[in-house]
Amino acid sequence: MTIDGTAARGLAYPALVGRPEPGDEVLLNTTALAMGLGTGGYAMVVAIPDRLPPDPTGPGHLVKARYTPLQATVLGADEQDSPHHDVLAEADSLGGMPVIVADLHSALPALLSGLLRDRPDARVVYVMPDGGALPAWFSMSIAQLKDAGALAATVTVGQAFGGDLEAVTVHTGLLAARLVLHADVAILAQGPGNLGTGTKWGFSGVSAGEAVNATAALHGRAVASLRVSSGDARERHVGISHHSLTAYGRVALARAEVPVPVLPGEFGARVTAQATALAQKHDLVRVPVDGLADGLAADEKAWGVRMSTMGRRLDGDLEYFLTCAAAGRHTATLL
């Protein structure tokens, strides 16, 4: 499509606006393009004025992206009309299911790589809250990982939508993952496009600490994956990011297992020292990273998924991906 004579990438969600055809005139939101966002740098199709989609007829009574022009009505696994309502109505326990919690969406393929290397038959469900993108459809990783058989399903919770199942809260999303989708492991991390302000508390990843609490409330086993970087230019994210130290050190009130990767050299010593700040609240578990780098590269190729975080690939921030894979490796020992 063109905007003022300039070619631009456009993105439409057919379930919300219909499917654009060549020659259509469309109403666009160009905020992401104007801001130069790395994630979501698309012109978003708001409407096809001359060919509006049919009115939704259901089923479902959950409204997500509520009170916005594109609010979507979906069938929630936990609502009364759902075939799963009876299963979830009095559900109260995950029965000890491991829940890997991470800050960034980019952790998802690396977590799976570390986990499935040792437990290839594990059934893993991704629970996506609303800290980043609201439509799960925006994530290419989800589609690629499902196509490759590495990820069984997705549950979208809160204001997020577009998963295989919808749920009202993180709590019912985790319960649906376990009791409806029969997950062995759940991974909970926000969708693409997290928000941060460079302040101690002003970042969407605080939800990682809240996810630890939700897991504990439901008798699950929380595994808190650290956000570690050697390639980030911002000092607050070098070594263990302040996001992890705040989310797990202050927001999480329940105990979790925190896999700490055994990384070499001065950087590895820095990560180990920073992790001690979490030792009073959580159980630190040292995890070797031998073989994980080769596994990450092999899975990236086999799954057709791009291992990338903040624009950095495996060779640009290997320690980030190794730390996520180490959390997956540790989780494999819990099954």
Image: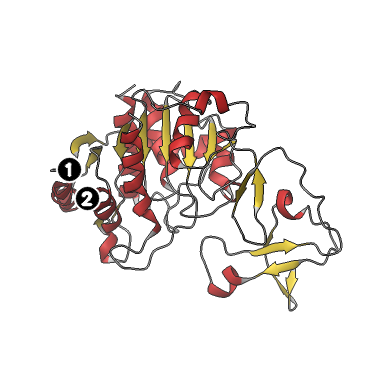
Residue 230, quarter of the rendered image: bottom left
Q: Position of residue 300 (x, y in %)?
A: 48, 40
Vertical position of residue 260 compared to residue 10: above or below: above
Residue 62, quarter of the rendered image: top right
Earlier in the chain: of badge 2 and badge 1, it is: 2
- Identify which amino acid the numbered label 1 is placed on: Lys
The label on residue 249 is 2
Would residue 293 be found to the left or right of residue 72 on screen? left
Along the viewing direction, whichever of 149 and 197 lies nearer the viewer: 197
The label on residue 273 is none
The answer to whether marks 2 and 1 mark residues whose Cβ atoms lie closer than 8 Å is yes
Along the viewing direction, whichever of 157 and 99 lies nearer the viewer: 157
Q: Secondary structure at mark 2?
A: helix
| Quadrant occupied by the C terminus | top left
Q: Residues within 10 Å of mark 1 (few under 14, many from 20)?
A: some
| Quadrant occupied by the N terminus | bottom right
Render colour scheme: secondary structure
Which residue was labeled with disc 1?
281
